[in-house]
């Protein structure tokens, strides 16, 4: 399983904070013994104090050509919740854009389903204020492929491209030119 260590670290940190008395939960035990040999699949693990559900579903990468900035003062998605209603409500504000950039308290954060990386001509930067510190983001930071920095919305114009990154979308898979971002 790709990036299993990063997913395990996030699960452990979440459970330490939300369920401090719960025993360990090893993600390797949640992976089905027989995985499909072809195609890309998303493995969704739902847990609380114990493992609740494991779902395996085919994954199709979304097409994102345009982004719209959505401004919000209060949104909390520090943990990867199964309940995404708050993010869906923000996504509904996108108008005719394919996806959103969430701007919280004047700072660029994430899209509705991924972290962001911004290219400024010679390096990729990820906002230091993500809604959710994703596993691909953590991996790219550890590899020093991207660096972290505050990204005030007024400085977004200094970048040329926005990449959407998550566990199933590595850096470069979904890249939108800044000209296709509605500020």
Image: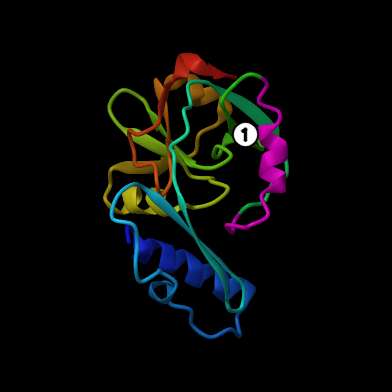
Q: Is residue 98 magenta?
A: no
Residue drawn at x 28%, y 47% is: 144
In which quadrant of the rendered view does residue 165 lie? top left
Residue 72 picture location, percent across and down: 71, 36
In the rendered image, the residue lying farthest to the top is 179
The majority secondary structure of the magenta stretch comes to: loop
Give the quadrant of residue 50.
bottom right
Vertical placement of residue 156 versus 49, above or below: above
Q: Secondary structure at mark 1?
A: strand
Percent x, y of residue 52: 59, 72
Residue positioned 43% across, 72% down in the render: 27
- Which residue is pictured at 33% across the width and 48% down the height? 140
Q: Residues within 10 Å of mark 1 (few under 14, many from 20)?
A: many
Q: Is residue 115 left or right of residue 17?
A: left
Judging by the rendered image, the residue that carries numbered circle 1 is: 103
Q: Is residue 107 left or right of residue 164?
A: right
Instruction: Report the quarter where the C terminus lies.
Output: top right
Expressed as whole percent of the image width and height from the top left, the position of residue 16 reads 56, 75
- Which stretch is magenta? 78-95
Rendered-image quadrant of the N terminus: bottom left
Let me know if residue 89 is in the magenta part: yes
Residue depicted at 36% across the width and 25% down the height: 120
Foreground of the two, 154 or 170: 170
Residue 171 horizontal/vertical position (percent): 34, 38
């Amino acid at each position: 399983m790709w990036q299993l260590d990063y997913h395990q670290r996030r699960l452990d940190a979440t459970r330490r904070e939300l369920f401090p008395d719960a025993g360990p939960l090893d993600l390797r035990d949640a992976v089905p013994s027989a995985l499909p040999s072809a195609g890309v699949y998303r493995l969704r693990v739902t847990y609380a104090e114990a493992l609740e559900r494991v779902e395996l579903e085919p994954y199709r990468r979304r097409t994102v050509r345009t982004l719209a900035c959505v401004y919000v003062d209060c949104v909390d998605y520090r943990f990867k919740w199964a309940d995404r209603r708050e993010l869906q409500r923000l996504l509904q504000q996108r108008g005719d854009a394919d996806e959103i950039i969430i701007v919280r308290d004047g700072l660029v954060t994430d899209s509705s389903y991924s972290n962001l990386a911004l290219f400024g001509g010679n390096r990729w930067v990820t906002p230091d204020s993500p809604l959710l510190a994703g596993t691909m983001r953590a991996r790219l930071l550890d590899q020093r492929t991207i660096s972290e920095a505050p990204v005030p919305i007024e400085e977004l114009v200094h970048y040329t491209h926005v990449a959407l990154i998550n566990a199933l979308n590595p850096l470069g898979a979904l890249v939108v030119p800044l000209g296709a971002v509605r500020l």
